[in-house]
Image (cartoon, coloured by chain):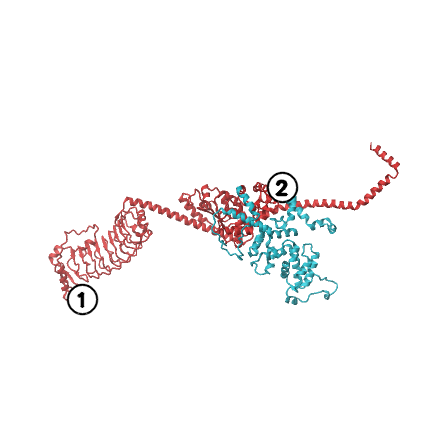
Chain colours: A red, B cyan
Amino acid sequence: MDFQAEVNCGLHLVIQTSSLPEKNKVEFRLNKETSSFPGRLLQHDLERNYSSRQGDHINLVSSSMPSFPILQRSSEEKILYSDRLTLERQKLTVCPIIDGEEHLRLLNFQHNFITRIQNISNLQRLIFLDLYDNQIEEISGLSTLRSLRVLLLGKNRIKKISNLENLKSLDVLDLHGNQITKIENVNHLCDLRVLNLARNLLSHVDNLNGLDSLTELNLRHNQITFVRDVDNLPCLQRLFLSFNNISTFESVCCLADSTSLSDITFDGNPIAQESWYKHTILQNMMQLRQLDMKRITEEERRMASVVAKKEEEKKRESHKQSLLKEKKRLIINNVARKWDLQQNRITNIATNQERKDSDSQDNSQNDGGTMSAFPEETGSLDSGLTSALQGLSVTDTHLVEVDGDTLSLYGSGALECLDRNWSVQTAGMVTTVSFTFIEFDEIVQVLPKLKIKFPNSLHLKFKETNLVMLQQFNALAQLRRVDQLTVDPQGNPVVNFTLWKYYVLFRLSHFSMQKINGTEVTQNDMIMAERLFGILAHVASSELPQYRLISILGDARKKQFRYLLETKGKKPGIVNEENNDSKRLVGENTNRATLNYTTRDFYNEKLEEIKEKKKFCKTYIEDLVKEATEINMKNEALQKLWPQMFIELVRDAVIEIRNKNSYMKICLQQITDQK
Amino acid sequence: MLSPERLALPDYEYLAQRHVLTYMEDAVCQLLENKEDISQYGIARFFTEYFNSVCQGTHILFREFSFIQATPHNRASFLRAFWRCFRTVGKNGDLLTMREYHCLLQLLCPDFPLELTQKAARIVLMDDAMDCLMSFSDFLLAFQIQFYYSEFLESVAAIYQDLLSGKNPNTVIVPTSSSGQHRQRPALGEASTLEGVEASLFCQCLENLCDRHKYSCPPPALVKEALSDVQRLTFCGFLVALSKHNGINQALGALPDKGDLMHDPAMDAELERLVVRSRLHRTSRQHRAEEPGAFGFQRRDKPEAPETVPSASAPTPCLYRWEPRE
């Protein structure tokens, strides 16, 4: 019989009968006055159809109600099939009145045109009611059927589940192929084992509590986007969600909590197209035995857990990365703001800036040369990161970031990172160093450290570093080698000067730079640079007095220059020549070496120091001058007086020896007195 | 040198006039600073070198501004050094802004003040937008006037203001009489309709100033000559006239004539040698085909590309000589 195919689930129908006979002997007798009936049913049609199909004769008799046919069966029929009545394909538009069949247990109205359930209230022993494929618009008229166990209302026009309050014994409820939009009024059906709501208009699943016996829930071919309450169904084993609108696992996450589920289908949903579909389901629903009508093997399960773990890892990783990126962005913003303040205000801001030290630096530091920048303890790190992020107040003032071959420093506090111990591998990989929001003068001071700690750094980038003078480029000469230089116009006014690149090439010619601000350096450029500034170099080296050269160059170059000076032949130009030895020792054209850069602060400091000396010199010279002028004065006075004195001397002498005798006596006297 | 008036001054004044003390003090100061280095090769040699460099004009290289400004000779030497070092920039035809010239100045003197450069630029640009471009010679001549005679110019500015506002600094105010005795200029309204001041009056004031000024002044005769063909002049006009007057330039003695500003054959030869050397230094590296103006930034005034081949004269022997040595 038809209804059995619908309920193919191992249902144990109470109705214990031998196979039902093909033919039913039912009689219909139609009221002759049915011509006034809204002309849908004619007796001869009925007879014709019925007898052609089933060969029974039905008699419909007139009843007291003018519009309902009355059904009567022959007594043999009644005795033979006392508990069942099949009225399928009878072209019924209304439920006929069924008289004298109060012990009917099975009623079949399939394939008719019935619009309302009526006239069956008296069949209070009814267990099985099949109204499949009719035109019923509303569930009603069932309130007396307290024994009803199977209610088949598929393929009707029902819009709402209602009026099932008294059907507490309901075992199977089939409402497929209707227009139901919402699951409701089923919470009291605690014996319900099968609920079929396929091919309806459901958009979500909830309100399922109370269905404590539900084993199978069919929701195929709906518009479901999310599922809830399924974990409240303690017996649910099979859940069919094929051909719905589920796209994320979160929308059905309650399924993970349902321990009874063993069979589930998701095919035809967007979620089934996702790459992570299978392993996510398997990973989250360990209790499943079949997915999409296919058995789940151990292998699959294992794969799923592996993949899921990997995904988890990746997600965590990307989460970490995005957190870190956010943090970096915040820090950089902070540094930028501080920098702006610094630039706009002439006076120094007091240096009471707190520093989020170990958190920001350790999380960014690269140790061990791995690409990821995190240590391995994930849990603590997550919390550490989030707390750091939360604790990241606007006082975080610098950022150090190592990204493979680039070391990026933001904010002047970042320069301290050069004091840290960097692993040789990490430091060796760094080829580009980028400075942002740091005063160039401060960078100059750490260049020696940079040279030592990051020996392979070949490309320097400066942005917002307050490069204003050509002279500042002189400071870069002390590095070992620079292949590329990038000076961002933002925050570096020096770039506005026409000749800045030529000056850089000239001063740093020993580096043989290849690129400046992304453009290749050509032979022509080098020549132009020499042409423009060559004389400056020449003047700076050959025309300075030696002591100045030495004092400017300092100790390291002393030996170098002495060597050169010894070989300084008759041709002054040669002293600037490349000499392999000199290159090895110094590594640069020595004629440029005197072009140095001292930061303004140092310069002023030096001038201050010299003031003392100057004062001393002044007084010293003054003393000397005084002495000299005194001597001069005395000299001049002497010059003036000398003639007179000379005359007097001569006169005195002449007077003395005028009288020879008395003079001799006086001399002798003098000699004896001396004894 | 041995003129009698030399001996007419008392000692200090004589020394001060020749700035001998300045150099002595500076020498001793340098000696103190570099005690360890200098003691190794003798103090006498040090003093020799020092005063030699003073004579040659190289003592001001890379020195602080206070020293450079201290004596007229220092100033003149500085101007000359600047000219020699950066003449090539001018020769190239580049026009630079005031700030760029200031940068170049700072290469030679790290703490050179910006105000001086600004004032010099104002002479050239006549108070126009300060970001205008200037040619090397224009700037240099204006800068020379501004730097060398800076104190003088300040006084002149004051005089000019006075004249402009109607006060004549030459007036002697006799307190006994009433208002009629003052030789007042006519009402301000009349002065303001005409620009500047009357040239002859101005010259007279300048002469008086030169007489009593202890700072260096341009020779008054030359000043008069410079202003001879104008009736009235503004302060800017005066400065421009000064800077363009060749005689004053020669009197200063630091720079060659304007026409010769780009010429310095000795340095050019030296430069060629340097360029050749640097070219050879790079021939070992791989280069791309030569592209003029590879930097891609705007050169404001592109001259003929200086692609001179080194002359096959004196430099070549030394090339041949040091190559095999390596």
Residue A203 visible at all: yes
Q: Chain of mark 2?
A: B
**How far across and down, in percent of the image, does residue A242 sit?**
27, 53
**How far across and down, in percent of the image, does residue A620 sit?**
68, 44
Q: Nearer the viewer, residue A31 or B28?
A: B28
The residue beneath circle 2 is B38
Q: Residue furthest top?
A: A675
In screen coordinates, is B145 left or right of B307? right
**How far across and down, in percent of the image, does residue B11 sit?**
72, 48
Q: Which element carries disc 2, helix, strand or loop?
A: helix
Q: Quadrant of residue A98?
A: bottom left
Task: Mark 2: give few (<14), some (14-19) or many (20+) Cα within 10 Å.
Answer: many
Cα distance, mark 1 to mark 2? 134 Å
Q: Which element carries disc 1, helix, strand or loop?
A: loop
Q: Can you say whether A424 is above or below A498 in the image?
A: above
The residue beneath circle 1 is A39
Q: Can you say whether B197 is above or below A168 in the image?
A: below
Specify the amino acid type for callout 1: Gly
Q: Residue furthest left?
A: A76
Specify the amino acid type for callout 2: Ile
